Amino acid sequence: MLRQGCWLYRSSKLPGSHQACCSIKELDAFSRASVIKVDPDKPLEGVRLAALQARKTLLVPTPRLRSGLFNRIVPPAGATKEILRICSTSRGIKEYSVPVGLDGKVRVDLVVVGSVAVSEKGWRIGKGEGYADMEYAMMVSMGAVKEETPVVTIVHDCQVLDIAEELLDDHDLTVDYILTPTRTIKTNCKRPKPQGIIWHKVSYEMLAKIPILKSLRYKEKQTGKDVTLQDEHPDLANANKSAALNEKAMPGNTRPQAAMGSAQLGQQYVESDSLSPRLEGSGTITTVYVGNIPPNVRVSELKYALREFHATPLKVNWQGAQHRAFLDYKDKAAAESAVSSLKGLSLGGNTLRVELAKNQRNKGQVEINSQKLI
């Protein structure tokens, strides 16, 4: 049983926390690391400061993963020790950080997490919300960490306990080193770390709360992985697999070619895909702008993503040569819901820019190569 006060080590500074954080500088894993990911917990400020002082690249997860996975802390040129100290705090994370997208090609050399309790075998218990476990699984999916990437936790001595293995699940992160104010413990943990996102344990609610999960799910589905969610009915899962197979089996000459042709001829073509007969007379059409589309992405890939994220519009107006598209929705509420669903979507290595269009397009615009999405 944890003694009263040990829990507070995750949220406030107890005597010895700074000493435990500083001891990380004695680890060979820290000395060798160029890129270090450290949780944003207040007791880990000392680790973040040590990383910045050693001129390491410091990555900090975004709070509750709401706006992405990482922020990279970028101190100003010639930063003093006091500025570096500020950079290691929650204030510094807000003021001196830049987001790192899925296309950032990040390679993390050392992972530092907080814990509520940990055993000398390396078995760890977090706060129960699962964010540290999910962050690690997402890093695996991104290729940012490998099985041999060391994981360190900083705790008070009273938080090192015997933990029954029955309390652990296959998504739980284990640790290789435990640092306390008085000890450095190498766990030699034999239990494997998570091998990636376990999609059948991910709910629609979690997918809505963590937008970057949607992009990772889409990427993994395209590689043929089973990404069936916790709340999906088996029949629905089979239908999704059939849709994916049909997409892959589509003959090359049936794929939309308007954008490619326009790029080659140097002309501006707009491909307009009618997706629903409700467009005519449906009221105020609201348009969503999708930008930063890579030149190698086809309209069929965008449409496939729209289906996957339940953001099917009434019409797609594809402007591939300009690396953008416009999506028509029946009203503002539907458009805003689509923007929320598509937030963080990555295609062809680019994170797309998705927002309500500033101006509504001319409804009489010439339509070319009209196709059904389904």
Image: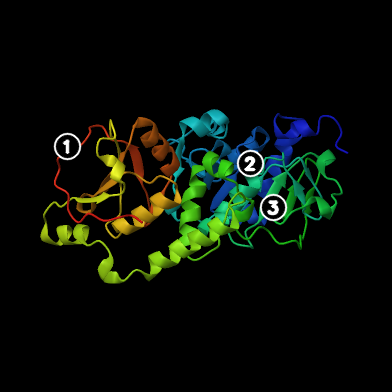
Q: Secondary structure at mark 3?
A: loop
The residue closer to the viewer here, 122 or 27, is 122
* Residue 13 appears left or right of 205: right
Above or below — where is 216 with respect to 114? Answer: below
Label 2 or label 1, whichever comes before in sequence order: 2
Residue 47 badge: 2
Q: Residue at x 78, y 40 (%)?
A: 181
Q: Residue at x 52, y 59 (%)?
A: 143
Q: Position of residue 16 (x, y in %)?
A: 76, 35
The residue closer to the viewer here, 244 or 20, is 244
Q: Secondary structure at mark 1?
A: loop
Mark 3 = which residue? 173
* Residue 262 appears left or right of 197: left
Label 3 or label 1, whichever comes before in sequence order: 3
The residue closer to the viewer here, 99 or 97, is 99
- Disc 1 marks a residue whose amino acid type is Asn
Q: Position of residue 41 (x, y in %)?
A: 64, 36
- Disc 2 marks a residue whose amino acid type is Val
Mark 1 = which residue? 362
